[in-house]
Image (cartoon, rainbow, N blue to C red):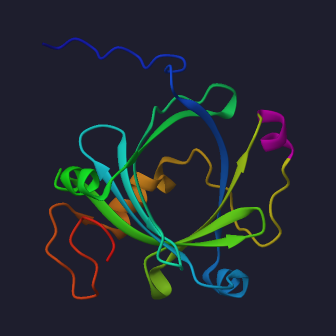
């Protein structure tokens, strides 16, 4: 009782480094960038901890379910991340756990992704780029269409956006055809 938690390992055995940079994009600018249908994503940030349950449905209807963990470390600008791909039944089992659930739309913009959280004037648009190494991430110029960079800002993490734009689990089925905290239907 009262003992501090052990620090996360430098690099967990099966984790990969994720190097990403993120920028806010003004809604009027974002609207001009999007083309084609988005991938619909439901993220469920499980509490307590750093686990994220994700259901992604492409414009063709292909669905991916996965459980991911970001370890919170950022050595050399990279964060350790692991993903485990799930069956629909495994996903449904985990979706009953408490946490924050948020829906977003992801559009492909050049080599990156533009995510929209929320609707209307309150929507937040975030452009994200992933990099193979720290040098490439550091050398990347600020995209001309982007506003300020929010990489590493705790107010703009996925979990923080879930608290701002999402809902607390458990949730009742929604009238828009999205079932509670579970899969997108």
Q: Is residue 112 magenta?
A: no
Q: Is residue 165 left or right of residue 112?
A: left
Position of residue 2 relative to residue 133, above or below, is above
- Please name the residue shown 43% across and 77% down the image: 118
Where is 13 relative to 27, above or below?
A: above
Drawn side of residue 19 relative to residue 170, left or right = right
Q: Looking at the figure, which quarter contains the C terminus?
A: bottom left
Front one among 3 and 129 = 129
Q: Quadrant of residue 91?
A: bottom left
Q: Is residue 23 above or below residue 27?
A: above
Secondary structure mostly seen in magenta is helix
Determine if the magenta segment contains residue 135.
Answer: yes
Pinpoint residue 1: horizontal percent, then vertical percent. 12, 13
Q: Residue 144 at what x, y percent from top left?
A: 83, 69
Kindly identify the residue that appears in the image at 45 percent across and 80 percent down: 122
Task: Give x and y (percent) for residue 42.
Answer: 38, 65
Q: Is residue 121 left or right of residue 148?
A: left
Residue at 28 percent of width and 87 percent of height: 176
Q: Which residues are magenta?
A: 134-139
Query: Foreground residue, 107 or 72?
Result: 107
Left or right: residue 184 compared with residue 20: left
Name the image quarter holding residue 79.
top right
In x, y percent, where is residue 32?
72, 87
Looking at the rendered structure, the number of numbered marks drawn on it comes to 0
**Residue 84 lies in quadrant:** top left
């Amino acid at each position: 009782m009262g003992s501090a938690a052990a620090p996360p390992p430098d690099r967990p055995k099966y984790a990969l480094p994720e190097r990403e940079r993120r920028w806010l994009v003004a809604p009027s600018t974002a609207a001009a960038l999007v083309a084609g249908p988005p991938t619909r994503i439901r993220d469920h940030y499980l509490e307590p901890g750093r686990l994220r349950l994700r259901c992604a449905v492409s414009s063709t209807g292909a669905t991916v379910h996965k459980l991911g963990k970001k370890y919170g470390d950022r050595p050399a600008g990279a964060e350790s991340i692991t993903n485990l791909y799930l069956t629909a039944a495994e996903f449904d089992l985990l979706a009953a756990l408490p946490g924050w659930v948020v829906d977003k739309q992801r559009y492909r913009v050049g080599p990156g992704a533009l995510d929209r959280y929320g609707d209307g004037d309150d929507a937040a648009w975030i452009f994200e780029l992933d990099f193979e190494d720290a040098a490439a991430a550091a050398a990347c110029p600020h995209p001309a269409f982007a506003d300020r960079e929010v990489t590493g800002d705790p107010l703009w993490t996925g979990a923080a956006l879930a608290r701002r734009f999402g809902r607390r689990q458990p949730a009742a089925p929604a009238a828009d055809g999205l079932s509670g905290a579970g899969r997108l239907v």
